[in-house]
């Protein structure tokens, strides 16, 4: 049988068009006329690579180079495809197996990123030492003060009243020993906002106080939501998750280069947005439980959410998927359902 193949001589990067003869007696004859190459080898001197689907067959010619020929029933018969790698070749060329792997691989990756990594993050967050949490929080507040936050314009005495009442509230609850100190800041860029750093430092913007008409019940509801994030160590979980996600992506996708960076960015965004929605619910439910413990009406939480919702653009189901926060409407209904 005479066919054409590509010959890659050893020690070079050339690809030569070769004439190949597979003889009945088991010898292989390769000739490249222009280069005056003529090689004759017996079957024993050939290292034949396994057949994979219909990709070209590769044959190592001992000490001479690599030969590549099309995979046809005739060449496969001569090269002995039926003997060795039949099962693998069948799997690779079997349509239903290919389709199954197209489903199973993404399903595994989805489960891995959605459940296993967050699971690990919860576990990991328990082991972050106190001082590391404190240093990370102090640095965050410091850089926020340098960039987004200004000194509060709220009357100092009023600020103190809020702080005292907040301490009163805290003393009625059983909480971690995190030091929940309340801080006020002015910020054009952040608007009506409140956030908690992992060490328990809580920051409320002047615009938020204005938005809730300085209503202390609403303020308490918002503060309880914020410390819900701290009690459940949400920031540490996010950090651990981001870290694990990037490590896992490196591991699974090795050196696929540029594509991975795109994927890393994307999956980080998707994973974390879903994660954040879950965390928002956790913090909401924490706040609602604490309000009940304090004998306060969960309606104040619902009202605070309504005020915040009014400052956001109209929501749609699509927004809910894209945003880090769950739909405000659902959160308000959740609070009202507690009564
Ligand atoms: Zn939150």
Image: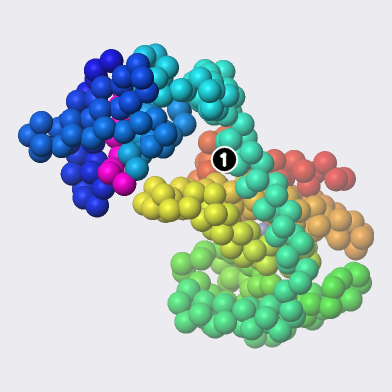
Query: Is residue 220 found left or right of 328 in the rendered image?
Result: right
Query: In the image, what residue occupies the spot 56% across and 59% down?
Result: 247
Give coordinates of residue 174: x percent, y percent.
91, 70
- Could one spot residue 336 in this view of the protein? yes
Query: Is residue 302 found left or right of 174 in the rendered image?
Result: left
The boundaries of the magenta stretch are 63-70
Neighbourhood count class around disc 1 (C-alpha, 10 Å): few under 14, some 14–19, many 20 upward: some
Query: In the image, what residue occupies the spot 51% across and 56% down?
Result: 250
Q: Residue furthest left?
A: 34
Residue picked out by circle 1 = 321
Relative to 229, residue 267 above or below: above
Q: Regarding ligand 1, which quadrant of the image does it lie in? A: bottom right
Pick whichever, 185 or 69, lies toward us: 69
**Residue 64 lies in magenta, yes or no?**
yes
Give coordinates of residue 109: x percent, y percent.
60, 42
Pick whichever, 281 or 45, lies toward us: 45
Query: In the image, what residue occupies the spot 7% across and 34% down?
Result: 34
Query: Which corner quadrant of the image does residue 160 belong to?
Result: bottom right
Query: Which corner quadrant of the image does residue 40 belong to?
Result: top left
Helix, strand or loop for the magenta stretch, by majority: strand
Give coordinates of residue 317: x percent, y percent.
57, 35
Q: Quadrant of the C terminus?
A: top right
Query: In the image, what residue occupies the spot 90% across and 63% down?
Result: 294
Q: How is the image coloured?
A: rainbow
């Amino acid at each position: 049988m005479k066919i054409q193949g590509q010959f890659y001589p050893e020690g070079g990067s050339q690809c030569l068009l070769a004439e190949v003869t597979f003889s009945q007696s088991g010898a292989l004859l390769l000739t490249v006329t222009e280069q005056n190459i003529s090689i004759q080898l017996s079957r024993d001197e050939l290292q034949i690579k396994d057949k994979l689907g219909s990709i070209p067959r590769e044959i190592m010619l001992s000490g001479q180079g690599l030969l590549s020929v099309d995979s046809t029933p005739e060449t496969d018969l001569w090269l002995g495809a039926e003997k060795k790698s039949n099962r693998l070749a069948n799997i690779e060329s079997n349509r239903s197996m290919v389709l199954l792997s197209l489903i199973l691989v993404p399903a595994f990756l989805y489960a891995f990123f959605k459940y296993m990594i967050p699971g690990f993050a919860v576990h990991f967050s328990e082991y972050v030492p106190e001082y590391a949490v404190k240093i990370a929080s102090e640095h965050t507040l410091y850089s926020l003060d340098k960039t987004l936050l200004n000194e509060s314009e709220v009357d100092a005495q009023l600020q103190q009243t809020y702080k005292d009442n907040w301490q009163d509230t805290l003393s009625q609850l059983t909480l971690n020993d995190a030091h929940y100190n309340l801080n006020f800041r002015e910020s054009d860029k952040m608007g009506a906002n409140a956030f908690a750093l992992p060490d328990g430092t809580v920051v409320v913007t002047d615009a938020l106080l204005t938005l809730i008409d300085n209503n202390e019940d609403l303020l308490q509801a918002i503060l309880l939501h914020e410390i819900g994030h701290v009690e459940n160590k949400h920031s540490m979980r996010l950090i651990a998750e981001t870290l694990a996600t990037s490590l896992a992506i490196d591991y699974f996708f090795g050196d696929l280069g540029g594509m991975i960076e795109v994927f890393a960015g994307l999956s980080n965004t998707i994973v974390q947005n879903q994660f954040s929605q879950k965390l928002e619910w956790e913090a909401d439910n924490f706040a609602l439980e604490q309000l009940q413990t304090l004998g306060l009406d969960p309606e104040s939480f619902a009202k605070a959410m309504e005020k915040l919702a009014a400052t956001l653009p109209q929501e749609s189901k699509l927004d809910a998927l894209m945003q880090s926060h769950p739909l405000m409407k659902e959160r308000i209904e959740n609070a009202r359902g507690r009564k």
